[in-house]
Amino acid sequence: MSDTTATFTPRVFSGIKPSGGLTLGNYLGAIKRFVDWQEAGTHQTIYSVVDLHAITVWQDPATLHAATREVAAGFIASGVDPNRSILFNQSQVSAHAELGWILSCVARVGWMNRMTQFKDKAGANAEAVSLGLYAYPALMAADILLYHATHVPVGEDQKQHVELTRDVAQKFNHDYKVDFFPETEPVIEGPATRVMNLRDGTKKMSKSGESDMERINMTDDADTIAKKLKKARTDPAPLPETVEGLQGRPEARNLVDIYAGLSGLSDAQVIAEYAGAGWGRFKPALADLAVEKLAPISTEMARLMADPAEIDRILAHGAEQARAVAEPILRETYRIVGLVRS
Ligand code: AQP
């Protein structure tokens, strides 16, 4: 039984839900890394707007299509090149749903019960949320394993789901006595793998958070980005002399981390540059950096979104390419399981 990905084609898969507008968290934790993988050229890169995941919570049908296009525009404007990466929306490749069902029959209820994201999202209302929200990690395992992806770049919050994907792959390989699915590696590297809410440094920045002031949206204009960062909550102390000094200061750590993620520096390098600085110096510098990096992306997103037919064309072409990779893997899965398929 294999416990490495060495025998598989080096391939990256990752996705983002169109459950609202993209945030700085999605950009730093995911999309920026997607572009790095594409640029490295070491792996085939496959990226998806995972709309089947979005509907695990209510989505207005009138806005879901637009949100799907917006996420696709965010990918492209950030540097995902549809000529070098496969870019598509999940629901156009029905193999995701087909393998999702098969892997739901492999995954165990006890595994789902341990998923912290489900507990966070369901809150006190666990009996009333959709069955899809509960089973989400089985579909996510299918998204990854459908392409025999060896590496999955994600933010910190998705680590547990990628680990569950490994468990699903192992159990499938064990139960059917095959060496078919890889044990995919989650890749969570560098600064800003968990960007926090600007109003509360103990909560993750999310698309669906209550207040717009708690997140930077990738469609925010320069003035809005600067205003939100200048109003971001902080403690009164200046920046510390060392990274260790950020301990117990979640808001300060978050802003340093965002600076590091945007600049390509490490947290330690940011602290070395701003040791002892007050917020009156650091926040405007951060706002300038954020505007410099994000404003061109939001301008390009607006340009792309003005031509929705072109985005749909790119997604349709990507879906065709994704099907070509997925189909033989799904076909072989059916054969291994003993399902009849003509
Ligand atoms: N705050 C974050 N910091 C770092 N990475 C993040 N990601 C999301 N938020 C942060 C990463 O973005 C990728 C796509 O996530 P998703 O949209 O599929 O789901 P999510 O993690 O549930 O994102 P949101 O923004 O919190 O969405 P809602 O509010 O709709 O649930 C993943 O790699 C994720 O780690």
Image (cartoon, rainbow, N blue to C red):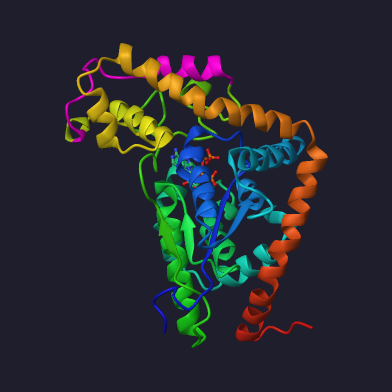
Quadrant of res 132? bottom right
Q: Which quadrant is the N terminus positioned in? A: bottom left
Q: Residue at x 45, y 83 (%)?
A: 174
Give the residue at the far right of this rendering.
Answer: 309
In the foreground, 334 or 242: 242
Expressed as whole percent of the image width and height from the top left, the position of residue 64 reads 71, 40
The reply to whether residue 211 is in sight is: no
Direction from residue 321 to residue 233 in the image, left or right? left
* Residue 194, above or below 288: below
Q: Residue at x 77, y 36 (%)?
A: 62
Q: Which quadrant is the C terminus positioned in? A: bottom right
Expressed as whole percent of the image width and height from the top left, the position of residue 29 reads 45, 43
The reply to whether residue 300 is in sight is: yes
* Residue 114, above or below 287: below
Number of residue marks: 0
Give the residue at the far top of this rendering.
Answer: 280
Direction from residue 26 to residue 186 in the image, left or right? left
Per the rendered image, the range of residues in magenta is 221-243
